[in-house]
Image: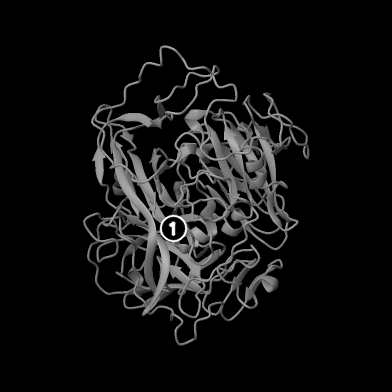
Amino acid sequence: MDTPSLNRRDALKVGLAGTAAMALPLQAVLKAKAASELPDSKMPKPFTQAFKAPPVLQPVARDDIADDVFGYVPDDYVPTAENSHFPGQPIRGSQYVGTDYYHLTETNVQVQIVPGVWTKMWCYAGGKGDSLARSIPGPTIRSYLQKDPATGKKMPRRTVMQVVNGLPKKHPTMDYVPWTSLHLHGSPSKPQFDGYAGDLTNPGEWKNYEYPNSCTPRTLWYHDHGVHHTAQNVYMGLAAQYHVVDRELEQALEIPQYDPSLPSYAPGQYEVPLILGDVILTADGQLLFDDSGEDGLYGDIILVNGVPWPNMKVEPRKYRFRMLNGCLARGFQLRLSNGAPFKVIATDGGFMQFAQEVTTFRIGMAERYEFIIDFAAFKGQKVQLLNDGVANAVDYDHTGKVMQFEVGTKVTSTKNNKAPTVLGAPHPVMTLKAAERSAVRKMKLHRSNGMWKIDDQTWDDVVRSGYTRLFANPARDAVEIWEVENNGGGWFHPLHIHLIDFKVLGRGEAGQTPPLPEEKGPKDVVYIAEGETVRLLMKFEHEDGRYMIHCHNLSHEDHDMMLQYQVGHHDIDCDAINSCPPKALPAPDLVAKTAAVAEPAPPATAPEADSTGGSTTTGSTPTTPDSTTTDSTTTGSTTTGSTPTTPDSATTGSTTTGTTATEPAPTGSGQ
């Protein structure tokens, strides 16, 4: 397929005061009455609609076959003299003890955000063909660790998710082709299953995504990542939660936990997902997309699990909430109306070692926090979850409200009703020390000539290089510090680094202020405020290949605040675009394995090597990179402010552009 041009500038509809008024830097929390065109009589009223939770999707097939295969080298691959890959060869990865198979279809749905008014959206529907279960948000997927019968060790189960793009050939009002690329955010997936921005599934195509679930237990989420249209597709509804669960650990901690015998939201269900969103509606109740000159979309209607300002009936006991900020641009500073505490037990990358008790916490776009609220002392009361707002945002009359808890007087069960402070061993990334780093890299987030950039580069630069341009090329298992600077401009940026988890070392003007209490756990998204530098410590583990780095203000990402880095090597076993390209419908049925995959013998006579580098390209990739492609190796860091001319490890066909620096002696907390 053709590589989409960055010149695309769509708007579903722009308000009368829209782009010209809002394209200026947002120096503080701006206030306005409303953004929607609905008359006051039609606007949803806070705390009047019933809370709901997304359904949990069940697999269509499963097996208990232990293996390590994640797809196969494509049949049209032309081998090279430099490696031993051949068509049909299994691509191997981390071990798993079985597989769960799911069907998902991206399709139309109508929902009532305003009672009595049907709003047209898109969703991930469980199933395919005529038997689709539609919901906004999409269904939650849960993967459980399982003991290996041979060793007794807890091991992950693989997920195979067959995704069909059943969307219309053109968006009905924005007139773009709704290509998609499914990203399981928080997963150490291989590049070909990571939702790479250029790995596009068009309407009428399908792709099988394979997830290792080899990360620590955590709250993940899956959402669209198609280049230049991520904001619109997520806004239309393409987002949902995904949980990797260690049932044995949860039972030992006796924390509130999901009961699979009950509906997602019912008496006795004490673990509940919360997906925050915000929307703007037209006068007839349809979604209005106005990102204010690519600054970001700030809706005046706050949604929780697709419901505006819902009222949730709870029992007077402890509840565990898995919260995701699924907004395109809005951050939240949350608190309870009665000042009661949240006990934060997990961050993006899973459980903290020690829970943090706070009365308020900040959550930027794509961040996830798990926390426990104890309602025992509030029998018969109503408690509101409120938003005090963040700088560089736009607030409206009711965006200071999120949802309401209506506390009953009876408890269905007192089982799993604890909120421990000690949660277990620390996540491996939290044990890293700054002194272990092999490099320190500096990154600047900024806007220049109307373009959102990282280090004065954009995703368009990556595309024009033939997808070879790199911010960094760390070796497998290398430990590095990245210092990320947001030097102003009136915006905050939630930065997401694919594949890995990281530890927040410090923040503030010099990056030496300790992280916030809720950040004292493994992260994959970090909130970087205006004028702030944040220092991150990370280990490049799990997989080789190329992975994206981007701002999770999705309008910023789409225009074009995204780069990539490469861990170790890049070849057909980890090529984000060519290793597992989408195919035309119909999609085959998913069939469970009956035996592990044996390693086939390579061809007796190798085909003539392809001198151009190996893999065949399904899309139209630029053939003239705008960067050098020589092999070289970096053995240390360079002086602050200089740009290395060679990658950190030998690689073919890529240029590293990240700036490294000599780090001062480690100081500050948490190192």
Query: Would residue 152 appear left or right of 465 to someone viewing this image?
Result: left
> In the image shown, does 652 or 421 lie closer to the viewer?
652
Callout count: 1
Tell me where residue 62 appears, x and y as whole percent: 25, 41
Tell me where residue 190 appears, x and y as whole percent: 46, 36
Q: How are the residues colored?
A: one colour
Tell me where residue 356 appears, x and y as whole percent: 48, 55
Instruction: Give SS at disc 1.
Output: loop
Q: Image quadrant for the C terminus?
A: top right
Q: Which residue is mark 1?
A: 238
What residue is shown at x 43% (from left), y 59% (from top)? 168
**Any part of residue 365 in sight:** no
> In the image shown, does 314 or 563 lie closer to the viewer?
563
Query: Would residue 322 appear left or right of 5 to someone viewing this image?
Result: left
Q: Amino acid at mark 1?
A: Leu
Outermost residue to the bottom? 41
> In the image shown, does 273 or 436 lie closer to the viewer?
273
What residue is shown at x 44% (from left), y 84% (from top)? 42
Tell me where residue 293 appears, x and y as whole percent: 66, 65
Using the image, determine if residue 148 lies above or below residue 583: above
Using the image, determine if residue 35 lies above or below residue 190: below
What residue is shown at x 29% (from left), y 58% (from top)? 132
What residue is shown at x 53% (from left), y 80% (from top)? 37
Q: Few, some or many C-alpha atoms within 10 Å of disc 1 (few <14, some 14-19, many ≥20)?
A: many
**Any part of residue 116 in sight:** yes
